Image: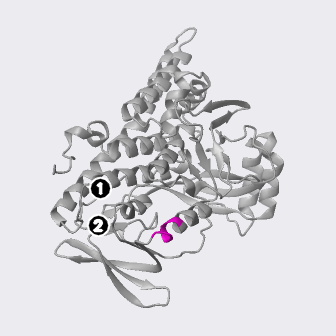
Amino acid sequence: MIFLVQDGRRVHVIERDLTEPDRIVGELLQPGGYLKLIELGLQDCVDKIDAQRVFGYALFKDGRRTRVSYPLEKFDSDVAGRSFHNGRFIQRMREKAASLSNVRLEQGTVTSLLEENGTIQGVQYKTKTGEVLKAYAPLTVVCDGCFSNLRRSLCSPQVEVPSCFVGLVLENCQLPFPNHGHVILADPSPILFYPISSTEIRCLVDVPGQKLPSIASGEMANYLKTVVAPQVPPELHDAFLTAIDKGHIRTMPNRSMPAAPHPTPGALLMGDAFNMRHPLTGGGMTVALSDIVVLRDLLKPLPNLNDAESLCKHLDSFYTLRKPVASTINTLAGALYKVFCSSSDQARNEMRQACFDYLSLGGVCSNGPVALLSGLNPRPLSLVLHFFAVAIYGVGRLLTPFPSPKRLWLGARLISGASSIIFPIIKAEGAMQMFFPTTVSSSPPQK
């Protein structure tokens, strides 16, 4: 929490493991997230890690391909997405934190929150030598990731696992569209490719459900070669097979969890411990960084965090003020994943094709959705308008040149299917806070 140090506060960071992590998550930072890094003065954390600039996406479906670019014309030339090894990025941020005199960075495992009269006073943790200690602070920020052991007392977690990612690294090959993320609308679900260094490309194969083919028995390699490889773009096919043969196959459950906090004096949840969305759109770090900026702006006027009543009111405001940005990115991720998966339902497949064709039109039809995806314009109303514009576009295609009863029925099912995708996600996110945050009590007390 470097922004707290910048405000003259002391920070004690306790991390379970301070060695460089090796993960297949947190590798793509959208341009909106990069802008938040700039706001926090952390943009140099993507320097010197061989991070690659990302300028948009390429979409592939049934032999067709199209490219959509981030709308970056109004921004400085440095503003773009970034993709990198997550561990290198984490280490750069740790180095930044450790260089500050007001930060104490310690390796240890937090075992519990210390509560007194309904207020969190700090944490109990075990050091790397096994010693059990307690640390006290007026504000405890819990950000222990998607497998959080501490969140149950601070929120009502409703975790869903719609699919898993199977990760590979392709080496010394070129993407069809350099410096772009690549999304293949494959059967049964999407395949992603994006650069993570100047010589490496990350491949993430989405596998619906929670049961994966066995890696140890060779089932996974066979699945990747027989089901996935034929759907990979020709430019990447050989490198994809080589990566499978090397055997460094990683897996990760894709989790989704709406934010459902129990406002608790003295404590705050952040990151994946608090809120998760399907990683298809790479929006996780953008949401987390946006949350940090909201929290920084709320706490900045507070001269003393020991004023428990005032701090609690400011923290309550955080949960509402974050909603429009976070919920837009969350809803887009969940809805887009469902649209991009193949289905036995003809109406769903028509929606999938309509989405590909709509984005291929260019202009406002691609700029609007990509501005949402990139975090550059995360507005809830814009999301809903574009989502149903895709559905209506799909209906229009069905009814051209001559509507028939069968096509009219299919069009009605398409609209109904689109509604059944997006409205439950919006409901789970909290429609009032998402669309009308000013109607919800959220403003911190005036000084």
Amino acid under disc 2? Ala
Q: Residue 211, can we see it?
A: no
Foreground tag (2 vs 1)? 1
CA distance separating discs 2 and 1: 17 Å
Circle 1 SS class: loop
> With 146 as the anchor, is 182 left or right in this view?
right
- On the image, the x and y values in percent for residue 38 come to 49, 48
Q: Which residue is mark 1?
A: 300
Q: Which mark is residue 147?
A: none
Of residues 143 and 223, the one nearer the viewer is 143
- Extent of the magenta region: 96-100
Image quarter of residue 184: top right
Residue in the picture at 36% in, 71% down: 150
Q: Is residue 429 above or below residue 304?
A: above
- On the image, the x and y values in percent for residue 227 come to 73, 48
First in residue order: circle 2 vs circle 1:
2
Q: Is residue 319 above or below residue 392?
A: below
Image quarter of residue 169: bottom right
- On the image, the x and y values in percent for residue 349 come to 57, 32
Residue in the picture at 61% in, 52% down: 207
Q: Residue 414, can we see it?
A: yes
Residue in the picture at 16% in, 51% down: 445
Q: Residues within 10 Å of mark 1 (few under 14, many from 20)?
A: few
Q: Which residue is mark 2?
A: 267
Of residues 17 and 347, the one nearer the viewer is 17
Circle 2 SS class: strand
